[in-house]
Image (cartoon, rainbow, N blue to C red):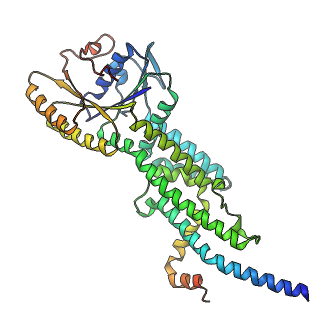
Amino acid sequence: MLKFLKRILSDFDTSHRESAAALTGVEVRELENIFALLLLGSFVGLPAPPSFLAVELLPFMERELKVLNSRARDAGDMLAEMCGTIGID
Amino acid sequence: MKILFFAGKGGVGKSTMAAAAAWQLSQKFRVLIVSLDPAHNLGDIFGTVIKDGKTKFTDTLYLEEVNLRKLSREYLQKEIDVLSSTYRYLQVLNLDNYFSILKYSPGIEEYALLTSIEKTIRDETDFDYIVFDTPPTGLTLRFLALPKVTITWIDRLIGIRRQILEKRYTIHRIRGTLSSEETILDYKEEDDDILKRLWKLSDNYQTLNRTLCGSDCHVVLVFNPDILSLKESERLIEGLSDLELPLRLLINNKVTEATEEMAGYVEKQMKGMAKDVPLERIHLAKTLLDGRNGALYDIRESIIPDSW
């Protein structure tokens, strides 16, 4: 019984922590998106830094590129994106 | 070690002036002259063939012609190697070759040029003087502007990167011991590869910028007694002062008796633009300047002031 209660409490804790972290998570994702966009913006016609800077950092940009890609994919459905962010199912 | 840049419009005699200055200086000091112009003629001026790397001309004078195409190729190859090793799995699909397309990226030439200047300044410390003969105005201003522009960009990118890491750290703290894919991401500044690379780049450029704007760097502006050359020189002076690069000498080259009046006018204009910068007038030689036996060494005017 005690074990069961402990489990409930821990799950409760987890869920609260997760929801607290979620918004910051969104923020991080957006920042990573901006970072990648600034660095590789020349591909979509944004004023870009000297392109060698992009070349120099490209080897480490795998995650940022993935984020950029997924953001671009989801951009067509901003409403769903927003609902997801504020937790409306 | 002192660094001299000879700048000016195409065809005003930058290379000849740089060569003559290098020769004069080499009578007293150890001098390296480097041609950055893609259309090299340093070898022709000294009447010798310059091989890859430094070539010894006399005991105190060394010549070097920078091969831009080779430099940009080497630089990109290095980056492509890093990319290919990071994305090694692509080799299985034989897709790694696609990275080679990077060699067509614009702006790589200026960067290669800047890298070569940086490398020369860093490595050739046993010379008293390094004389750079630069490509025509446009390219010169672009690559001299690169360190400043790049530093600005790098600073901004470092700012964003730090914010990302900070947020990642917050998430890590909130989630506590919970392990998920997100918490595995680097959140410490010293673990982040991108930030480390950015810091290193920033460091390199700050050093280079300090050297270029420092008191041991001299930019010499060469011009001719004609309006076109005057106009372009004015633009160059503006560009240099925007970049806070030290213009230290004006040379009015190829003055003849017939152009004496024009020379006076151009000099007056230039003096108005660049006050307190000494001006030297060099007359057009009657004989063709050509190599070891020619009249190059007979440029009587001492080009570089003794005070440098």
**B130 above or below B139?**
above
- Residue B132 position, x and y percent, is 38, 29
Foreground pick, B93 / B244: B244
Q: Quadrant of residue B62?
A: top left
Task: Please give the count of numbered marks on the rendered protein.
Answer: 0
Q: Is residue B161 left or right of residue B302?
A: right
Q: Residue at x 74, y 79 (%)?
A: A14
Examine the rendering and report whether any part of residue B105 can be seen.
Answer: no
- Residue A31 position, x and y percent, is 54, 67
Q: Quadrant of residue A68?
A: bottom right
Foreground pick, B215 / A3: B215
- Residue A35 position, x and y percent, is 52, 62
Q: Quadrant of residue B68?
A: top left
From the image, which quarter does the N terminus of chain B lie in?
top left
- Residue B15 position, x and y percent, is 31, 26
Foreground pick, B122 / A60: B122
Q: Which residue is drawn at 40% across and 35% down?
A: B214
Q: Is residue A12 left or right of residue B84?
A: right
Foreground pick, B35 / B303: B303
Q: Which residue is drawn at 90% across and 84% down?
A: A3
Examine the rendering and report whether any part of residue A11 can be seen.
Answer: yes
**A24 above or below B5?**
below
From the image, which quarter does the C terminus of chain B lie in?
top left
Q: Residue furthest right?
A: A1
